[in-house]
Image: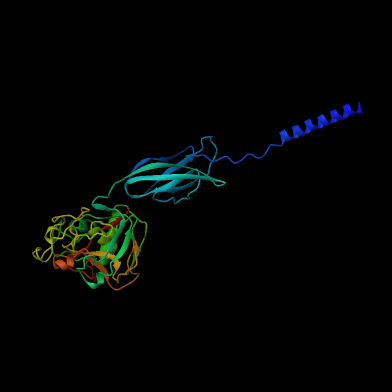
Amino acid sequence: MKKAVKIMLMFMLMITISCDEKTTEPEPENEAPVIGSITANPAEITINGETTIYCSATDPEGDEITVSWSSQTGSFPNGNTGSTVLWKAPGTAGEYYIRAVVNDNRQIASDSVKVKVTTITPEGMILVPGGTYQMGDTRNEGDSDEKPVHSVTLRSFYIGRYEVTQKEWVEIMGGNPSEFTGDNLPVEQVSWYEAINFCNALSDKEGLERYYTVNGEIVTQNAGKKGYRLPTEAEWEYAAKGGLTGSGSPSTYSGSDNIEEVAWYYGNSGNTTHNVGTKAANELGIYDMSGNVYEWCWDWYGEYSSSPQTNPHGPASGSYRVLRGGSWLNLALDCRSANRFRYLPDYRNTYFGFRLAQDL
């Protein structure tokens, strides 16, 4: 009898242990995160410059997720985490991939969406796609201040198809300062300061935020504003060389090795300016970057550095502002794309004009 009771007790104990094991379950392993889909609204967009679009990610189970976002280009100015973000789409046409990543305890799930961007180029402007080029006298044809040749990387920008004409000047500024008069002739007798004032006045007319703040003779740039501006010296040369990247050698003049094809200069001008766009354009469709009138650039004049540069704006200070391109009065040597000229910013002459630029 005692033996039977003992066996019964042992059996009951085993049942109790078995039940305890069943009620004490191990902690489940973390499941890998999942992104069900990501979307961009809209997935196809036509824009003039940069804009923002919505991007969102969802979980197939309907759970809340926090994701980190990245893009092939552009940025996320309002933060780059969360299930919904604003993506700053670039102003350059193309197909871009937006990627969402969930990282949970070192387990990663990701998905991407393609966004197609089509751009509208402002009237009268040419889109210059960004790139890296060799700035300076790559053909060993010029002066010492065109050396050393150095690598410059530029973002995309807009530049005027033509030099600013007298008709455009009169519509914005009133009187005509030019010596040689005609609606489609380039405006001349314009100082650097007056060119800056034209940029601001045109921006005002078109409802754009001014790129420049002017306080007497002190002019500062408002980076990121969409108003009109002068090209930097590096942008000007890049555009004059046709936006050509790499180590290849561009034409001597803007669009050709034959100056007669692309420029009004001392040898063919008859000592006067000519209507814009009457010579051949360069590779980008830009006219008169060689000859007709010198064109003011933003930069203070200074010596080149051999170091690679990205979006340079020239020295912080100086006495002279840069002009580029040569004019109706100049010899062929002065109309080369790499040639540099400088003058006091308040100086005017019958061979000084300008063309516009604009950020995307």
Q: Is residue 195 left or right of residue 267?
A: right
Q: Nearer the viewer, residue 213 or 15?
A: 15
Figure quadrant of residue 172: bottom left
Q: Is residue 346 visible?
A: no
Q: Is residue 148 left or right of residue 165?
A: right
Q: Is residue 286 above or below residue 191?
A: above
Q: Is residue 208 above or below residue 9?
A: below
- Percent coordinates x, y for residue 75 in the rendering: 42, 51
- Percent coordinates x, y for residue 24 in the rendering: 71, 37
Q: Nearer the viewer, residue 337 or 85?
A: 337
Task: Name the residue at 25% across, 53% down.
Answer: 125
Q: Is residue 100 visible?
A: yes
Figure quadrant of residue 3: top right
How many marks do you count on the picture?
Answer: 0
Task: Name the residue at 81% across, 29% down.
Answer: 11
In the image, farthest residue toward the right = 1
Q: Quadrant of the N terminus?
A: top right
Figure quadrant of residue 31: top right
- What colour scheme was applied to this rendering of the protein? rainbow
Q: Nearer the viewer, residue 42 or 249?
A: 249
- Percent coordinates x, y for residue 41 in the rendering: 41, 40
- Percent coordinates x, y for residue 306 in the rendering: 32, 69
Q: Nearer the viewer, residue 255 or 187?
A: 255
